[in-house]
Amino acid sequence: MLNRLLITGAAGQLGSMLREKLQGRAAILRLSDVADLGEAHEGEELVPCDLSDGDAVMRLVEGCDGIVHLGGISVEKSFDLIEAANLRGVHNLYEAARAHGRPRIVFASSNHTIGYHPQTARLDHSAPYRPDGYYGVSKIFGEAVASLYHDKFGQESALVRIGSCTPKPENWRMLATWFSHDDFVALIEAVFRAPVLGCTMIWGASNNDHGWWDNSHAAFLGWQPKDNAADWAEEIARTVPRPDPDEAVARYQGGVFTDEPIHRS
């Protein structure tokens, strides 16, 4: 069991879910965000922190022996906003980890690093980047920082390219991209349990019949996702209109992000 597990972005949708589901997986959960985290429960420490503040991040990471990094901006925004939260923030996190004994990191990357690949393609870990916006570019930067710190300093990271991590699949695209909460928790457990991790990219998706991504390169982790978006296919067919094949959401793996304009301000 980990002694102190840090979760950044703990007030967000995924952070709030992991705050609940990772209780008992570490002696202490250190929870951080710029947003309100409410009251601390038993076994929790609340440490507000702006990831763009390097000194604050250095203090945040001290004493942690594991990190789940969800913090930053998770949608398409202007470059200035993304630069501060996602680029400077991930640099500060990795510098702090290097200074404090290199605790293993689960880095929440994204399918938007490869968003312009067509939905007809099946991708493995060697697929080239095709980001669909500044958000996707920021996650590529984060993966590159993780790779650098692994090669230069021995920092281990799991780069989890999250698909659609929701309680259940909500639309046709999610029949391929859905990543159940339970499968995400099981992946985190496998990452911290593995004797050796290295710097490994993992597609964050459940065992979906219609999935686009091949995780065979990460089989050494012993992680086997159990949930399947196909269990919801009939409900989606009944309640969600099927998009036109020419729409971005039906053409590209990044879905509607590929149709968004660049945010100038």
Image (spheres, rainbow, N blue to C red):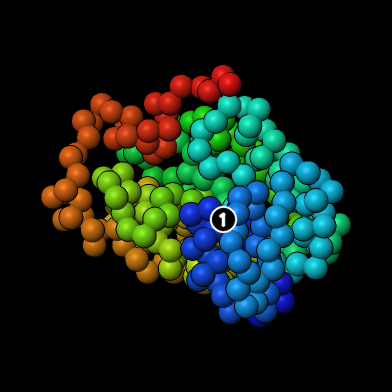
Q: Pinpoint residue 52: horizontal percent, then vertical percent.
A: 74, 41
Relative horizontal placement of residue 72, taking residue 154 as reference (left or right)? left
Q: Which residue is mark 1?
A: 11
Q: Pinpoint residue 241: horizontal percent, then vertical percent.
A: 18, 40
Q: Amino acid at mark 1?
A: Ala
- Could you tell me which residue is drawn at 50 percent across and 38 percent down? 75
Q: Pinpoint residue 138: horizontal percent, then vertical percent.
A: 62, 36
Q: Nearer the viewer, residue 72 or 251?
A: 72
- Could you tell me which residue is drawn at 32 percent across and 38 percent down? 120
Relative horizontal placement of residue 153, taking residue 233 as reference (left or right)? right
- Could you tell me which residue is drawn at 67 percent across and 33 percent down? 83
In the picture, residue 231 is in which quadrant?
bottom left
Residue 149 visible within the image = no
Q: Pinpoint residue 240: horizontal percent, then vertical percent.
A: 19, 44
- In the rendered image, the residue lying farthest to the left is 238
Q: Is residue 77 above or below residue 208?
A: above
Identify the image quadrant of the N terminus: bottom right
Residue 150 visible within the image = yes
Identify the image quadrant of the C terminus: top right
Q: Nearer the viewer, residue 227 or 82?
A: 82
- In the rendered image, the residue lying farthest to the front is 39
In the picture, residue 258 is in which quadrant?
top left
Query: How many residues crowd around disc 1 within 10 Å: few (fewer than 14), some, or many (20 or more)?
Result: many
